[in-house]
Amino acid sequence: MSGEPKKPTPVVATDDFVSRWSRLKRASAQTPAGNQEASPPAPVEAEKETRLPTDADMPPIDSLDETSDYTGFLSEKVSEALRRQALRKLFHSEAFNVCDGLDDYAGDFTSFAALGDIVTADMRHQLALAKEKLTAALDSDSTAAPTATDDPASANSDVPPVAEQAAPEETDRDDTAPT
């Protein structure tokens, strides 16, 4: 029973911050000897992690490809110009240079295809139909137009033409309208 770790005491809602902190600190101090191997790494390893790569540590830009590791170029000690060159190299690679075809304005709309004979033949056909309709309308107007002998207005010479008739007098005046 002495080898078994102690069960942590349940947290009581009435505990304040200081008592909770004190209890957890005592519990961590009483850890078994076997758990001491999981202590933080040695300071030498921590020093390696804190040492940030610089421009001199980076590989040449020409040697980079899609599978290269670009994370070192994002370090604070790497110059902005070198970072930009590396990212430009990355984003110009085949993995990022794919056009999905969904761009509405990606096509070349400056060169047009020739209309061709099919459209021209259809246009000629439409013009011929329009000409036939126009001639039919003119023919129907000329047959429907009365001749001088058939005109009833010319038979009655006492009726003046419409242009010569006098305009009717205005009899319905609005007395409420301002003058």
Image: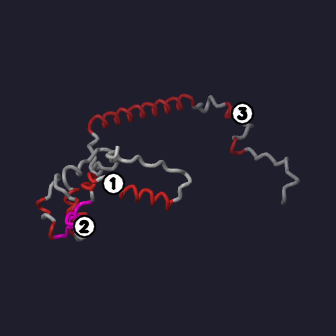
Residue indicated by mark 1: 31
From the viewer's perspective, is the residue at label 2 or at label 3 nearer? 2
The kind of residue on which mark 1 rests is: Thr
Q: Please, what is the three-letter code of the amino acid marked with disc 3?
A: Asn
Labels 2 & 3 near each other (Cβ < 8 A): no
Q: Nearer the viewer, mark 1 or mark 2?
A: 1
Kindly state the secondary structure of the residue where label 2 is placed: helix
Q: Position of residue 126 (x, y in %)?
A: 38, 34
**In this rendering, does residue 87 appear at all?**
no
Count all numbered tags in the image, as a single digit.
Answer: 3
Q: Residues within 10 Å of mark 3 (few under 14, many from 20)?
A: few
**What element does badge 3 sit on?**
loop
Q: Nearer the viewer, residue 65 or 115?
A: 65
| Pointer 2 residue | 50
In depth, the one of 34 and 92 nearer the eye is 34
- The residue carrying mark 3 is 156
**Magenta span has 44?**
yes
Instruction: Please name whichever residue, 121 or 33, is drawn nearer the observer in this view of the structure.
Output: 33
* Magenta region includes residue 38: no
- Per the rendered image, the range of residues in magenta is 40-55
